[in-house]
Image (spheres, rainbow, N blue to C red):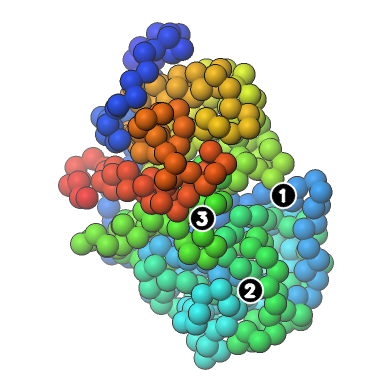
Amino acid sequence: MNTNTQGTTTFRAGVLHWLIVLTVPVLLVLPSASAAGHPPHAGKDWVGSWAAAVTPPAADRPAVRDFRNRTLRQVVHLSVGGDRLRLRLTNVHGTEPLTVGAATVAVRTGKTGTPKVDPEKLAEVTFNGEPATTIPVGAEWVSDPVDVAVPDDGDLVISIHLPKATGRASVHYEGLARSFAAPGRATGDPGGAYSAIGTSRYFLDGVDVHSEADGSVVFFGDSITDGVESELGADHRYPDVVADRLVRRPDAHELGVLNAGLSANRLLTDAGLGGEAALTRFARDVLGQTGVRTVVLLEGINDIHNSYGTVDPERLIDVYEQFITRAHQAGVRVVGGTITPFEGAPRHTAEGEERRQAVNSWIRHSGAFDAVVDFDAALRDPEHPTRLAPRFDTGDHVHPNDAGLAGMAGTVDLSALDRSPGRAFRN
């Protein structure tokens, strides 16, 4: 339990009996629950600019694909830029060592949605000074710095040759950008050898940049954070839109934005395509990120929805408190997001709605978080507050459309992301 929130036990004992106030402000900035947060640094340092949470393949797709002697080409959309970069490759869910034969990167200047690059702009990636490496089972591997300058809000094309059978892939299913593959070693190919293989990402979970940014913020959640219903290739996930807002500030080079959303993820249990429970992956996907200062937490809807509302809200609150304790121990601020409406979804029940409201009351009023962003208030229908506003609803009554995701991003107070002791607050 968070020892900085005196009276929390009393509060939680009666949480189901709270009178829910549906007209609360969209954002509540609370007094800091700890001295979490790192002071701004002077000069350049490594920060995270892009990330993806990975999961083992689902039971019906045990290996996902055979990548033996093939080259993967994947495109990632960065938040902040820098004068150098390094890749973070992953074999965390693998079943055998992952051999990387060669890798290249290039800033994309061509049309979105294609594998084409200017071959003169391709730069080789090395690992401990060598072009090839082998990543042990269960490990993440960071490349040497690559002397390629990348812009804010830019696209990076990453090509990885996999000369041997890869075993079980570490995969992010909802990449929302086309991935490509070519036979053999094609890391220097301008694009003609490649064919599209879908929109999942493989063996790649981060890009760091050498930047004047003060650090990074991780958006941690499920399919809503993952942006699963947003436009393909448009980078309209709500963390992407927050990144755009950060870049447009007068002091643009301030925070990298990392999306650790994972579709179908739950707080309490592992979930097939949704991967490991949120508490299990928190250390890797949040605390393990480069330069992390703040995490924005939006999880819980899948636990409520998939249980038909029978989950005990106290159990969800226990997990939130664990997140807060572990993050504060690491000097990371925690911004809590309220759970969004889902009336009309297949497993919505009156009991589930009561659970959602109880958890949201705790998020808003307990004082446990360093700040609160009220996504519920931003997305709900003013005439029917237990459901999404029709203009934000994709039709499944759970996932916001692009307009809804933009509304969520606009709800986030940027100063709550980089607040630290003794620092001026900028918006």
* Residue 73 in view: yes
Give the side of residue 19 with respect to residue 305, left or right: left
Nearest the viewer among 307 and 206 is: 307
Disc 1 secondary structure class: loop
Mark 2 near mark 1, Cβ–Cβ under 8 Å?
Answer: no
Give the side of residue 414 with respect to residue 264, left or right: left
Considering only order in the chain, which callout, 3 or 1, is on the residue closer to the N terminus? 1
Mark 2 near mark 3, Cβ–Cβ under 8 Å?
Answer: no
Image coordinates of residue 151 in percent, x first then y, are 38, 73
Mark 1 near mark 3, Cβ–Cβ under 8 Å?
Answer: no
- Label 2 and label 3: CA atoms lie apart by 22 Å
Judging by the rendered image, the residue that carries numbered circle 3 is 230
- Label 2 and label 1: CA atoms lie apart by 20 Å
Q: What residue is at 32 percent from the left and 28 percent from the top? A: 33
Identify the mark at residue 262; answer none if there is no mark.
none
Identify the mark at residue 56; answer none if there is no mark.
1
Identify the mark at residue 73; answer none if there is no mark.
2
The number of discs equals 3
Disc 2 packing (10 Å; few <14; some 14–19; many ≥20): many
Q: What residue is at 45 percent from the left and 37 percent from the top? A: 388
Residue type at mark 2 is Arg
Disc 3 secondary structure class: loop
Disc 2 secondary structure class: strand
Q: What residue is at 39 percent from the left and 67 percent from the top? A: 153
Residue type at mark 1 is Pro
Image coordinates of residue 31 in percent, x first then y, are 26, 29
Image coordinates of residue 271 in percent, x first then y, are 68, 38
The mark closer to the camera, 1 or 3, is: 3
Q: What residue is at 52 percent from the left and 30 percent from the top? A: 343
Q: Is residue 62 above or below residue 203?
A: above
Residue type at mark 3 is Ser
* Residue 205 in view: no
